[in-house]
Image (spheres, rainbow, N blue to C red):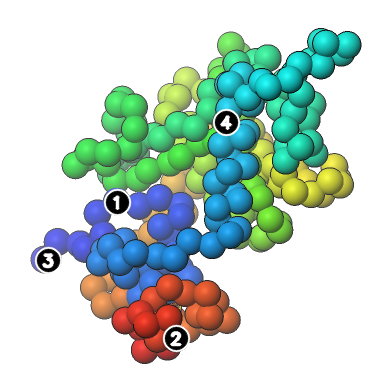
């Protein structure tokens, strides 16, 4: 039996593999550079603002009358929630590494030969009653695929904190003002974790078994850095 070409994964790696195995190979196995985009840059900037505000770093002003920190305009649709996270001293931007048996490595960060699954968290709050809140910030439009990833977040939460009995995942669509539309909340109990794990084991199997990584052309080829049009190695 030959060794798998893919040795570790994350949700974003899985999503790229699903979109196009050849694109995944170019980026993650051949390590070819990928073009950035204005939307990606904006997303990174807003993630940093959210991180800094939650940590209390972003404080150029203070609303003395209301005795509240002023939330950056980019986060205004979730102003009250960001203030609450800050008061709760939520933990921001962490990278968790898990071994093949889904056990947490116990180290900060996700690098190391034994890391098989990598999870990145934007914000999480662990409460005294062994429940966990995990928040993921999204910029741009709401996509169905975003919901795919919340189960995996919840599973990572259960694996990272073995005593946790319930995980609430929250996707915050920062650019959407309508409060009926801009948050997706899901609640999972530890009983759900076994099924979620089984489901993801099945989902990622083709990626670990693949040795050919065929191209899968779609409407997204026009934006792909590895396309023929952009001088990349792909035939499409
Ligand atoms: S151009 Fe299309 S088929 Fe080729 S790698 Fe990119 S996404 Fe895949």
Query: What residue is shown with label 4?
Result: 51
Note whether residue 184 is visible: no
Q: CA distance from mark 4 to mark 3?
A: 42 Å
* Residue in front for this viewpoint, 146 or 166: 146
Mark 3 or mark 2, which has the lower sequence index? Answer: 3
Is the residue under label 3 in contact with that under label 4 (CB below 8 Å)? no
Compared with 137, 230 (above or below) is: below
Instruction: Judge from the rendering whether residue 137 lies leftward or rightward of residue 208; answer left or right.
Output: right
Q: CA distance from mark 4 to mark 2?
A: 37 Å
Residue 3 image position (x, y, % from top left): 14, 61
Instruction: Choose top left, top right, bottom left or bottom right for residue 207.
Output: bottom left
Badge 2 element: loop
Query: What residue is shown with label 3?
Result: 2
Is the residue under label 3 in contact with that under label 1 (CB below 8 Å)? no
Q: Nearer the viewer, mark 3 or mark 2?
A: 2
Instruction: Judge from the rendering whether residue 211 lies leftward or rightward of residue 193; answer left or right.
Output: left
Q: CA distance from mark 1 to mark 3?
A: 16 Å
Give the farthest residue toward the left: 1
Q: Nearer the viewer, mark 4 or mark 1?
A: 4
Quarter holding the C terminus? Answer: bottom left
* Residue in front for this viewpoint, 145 or 220: 220
Query: What residue is shown with label 1?
Result: 8
Q: Nearer the viewer, mark 4 or mark 3?
A: 4
Q: CA distance from mark 3 to mark 2?
A: 34 Å
Mark 2 or mark 1, which has the lower sequence index? Answer: 1
């Amino acid at each position: 039996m030959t060794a798998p070409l893919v040795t570790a994964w994350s949700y974003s790696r899985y999503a790229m593999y699903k979109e196009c195995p050849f694109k995944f190979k170019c980026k993650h196995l051949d390590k070819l550079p990928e073009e950035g985009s204005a939307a990606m840059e904006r997303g990174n900037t807003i993630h940093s603002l959210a991180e800094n505000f939650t940590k209390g770093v972003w404080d150029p002003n203070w609303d003395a009358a209301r005795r509240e920190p002023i939330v950056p305009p980019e986060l205004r649709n979730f102003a009250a929630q960001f203030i609450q996270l800050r008061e709760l001293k939520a933990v921001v931007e962490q990278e968790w590494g898990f071994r093949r048996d889904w056990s947490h490595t116990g180290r900060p960060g996700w690098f190391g030969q034994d890391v098989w699954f990598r999870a990145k968290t934007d914000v999480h709050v662990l409460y005294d009653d062994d429940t966990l809140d995990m928040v993921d910030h999204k910029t741009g439009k709401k996509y169905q695929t975003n919901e795919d990833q919340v189960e995996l977040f919840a599973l990572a939460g259960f694996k990272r904190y073995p005593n946790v009995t319930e995980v609430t995942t929250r996707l915050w669509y920062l650019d959407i003002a309508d409060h009926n539309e801009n948050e997706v909340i899901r609640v999972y109990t530890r009983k759900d974790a076994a099924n979620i794990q089984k489901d993801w084991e099945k989902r990622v199997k083709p990626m670990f078994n693949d040795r050919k990584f065929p191209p899968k052309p779609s409407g997204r080829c026009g934006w792909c850095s590895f396309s023929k049009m952009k001088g990349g190695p792909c035939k499409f």
